[in-house]
Image (cartoon, helix red, strand yellow):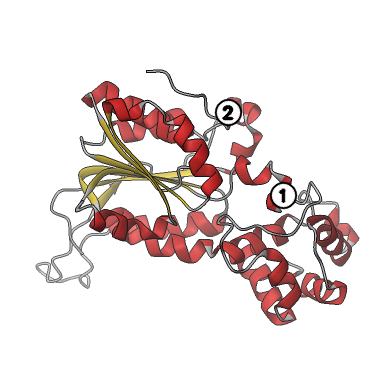
Amino acid sequence: MTMTAAPHVPVMLDRVVALLADAPDGVLVDGTVGAGGHARALAEARVERYGHVHLIGLDRDPMALELATATLDGLGDVGTVELIRTRFDALPDILDDRGIDTVAGILLDLGISSLHVDRAERGFSYRQDAPLDMRMDPDLPVSAADVVNSWSRGDLARILREYGEERFADRVARGIVAARPLRSTGELAEVVRDAIPAAARRRGGHPATRTFQALRIAVNDELAALEAVLPAVVERLAPGGVAVVLSYHSLEDRRVKRAFAEAATGCICPPGLPVCGCGRTPLVEALVRRPERPDEHEIAANPRAASARLRAVRRLPGGHR
């Protein structure tokens, strides 16, 4: 089949496909389908192995879904492709609405993509001056401009600390409040730069990086969505089913690590009991013992892959909490 080339470079593509290739026949979910690069490769691998594919792709960004539609064109001839505009934590409802109890594989590629960063008008990047927006779903009621211009100094400092791990959160929050109104990414980046001590500005990349990350996470409620979906990622896998998650900063990876470790935990009875009384057995086994990273060749070809961390688990038969 002939399909349109993806307009971006999927991160750790070969490794993702290899991990999910071992999943049994059944429904495959790409919870962050984006422009469809991972989904296309995964679907082609499923067709090669099983002769058909049933792919469900989720994304909150309508522009991404338009690109994914073009990228995945032709797959309908050898299976079922459903692209749905929604946030990935709606996964249980999406499956329930279709009468699907379990799936063979799930992929989550977290964070932002080139669709967001490379389009200045989306307001995600400090590298190009544009209106402050940062909404992955353009219909969200609150933009980054709303946050920086209406939230209290205390609330701004809180999200900068929690979501950006910004050492100078209080200074940056004071600078933002003093400079209001702020309407563009360039204005915000300048305020952040001026708020951070000169010595700190000379280390660790652009001084606005952490502030922009924090605002993006707050606007899109990213961490709450991730925490909401992770239990379903494990529980909705069929026996032998595989889940793969790509994260791009420690806040995401920490939550994935914790959820997968909990699902892989068996008996929790106090030590010394002669027999297990809790009856708990692991739901999953880790396919990746520690987070995998892109190799130097991929990073050289796609520098945005540098921060990626991959974790993966396989559902065990009969496991329960």
Q: Amino acid at mark 2?
A: Glu
**Which structural element holds mark 2?**
helix
* Image height of 169 relative to 95, above or below: below
- In the drawing, does residue 174 fall left or right of residue 320? right
Q: Which mark is residue 298?
A: 2
Q: Residue at x 85, y 64 (%)?
A: 191
* Earlier residue among tags 1 and 2: 1
- In the drawing, does residue 185 fall left or right of residue 62? right
Q: Which residue is mark 1?
A: 121
Foreground pick, 76 / 158: 76
Q: Which mark is residue 172?
A: none
**Which structural element holds mark 1?**
helix
Where's residue 103, x and y in %?
24, 46
Frontmost of labels 1 and 2 is 1
Q: Amino acid at mark 1?
A: Glu
Q: Residue at x 45, y 63 (%)?
A: 225
Q: Quadrant of residue 305?
A: top right
Q: Quadrant of residue 176?
A: bottom right
* Image height of 304 relative to 73, above or below: below
The quadrant of the rendering that contains the N terminus is: top left
Residue 124 in sight here: no
Q: Residues within 10 Å of mark 2 (few under 14, many from 20)?
A: some
Q: Residue at x 21, y 64 (%)?
A: 321
Where's residue 106, x and y in %?
34, 45
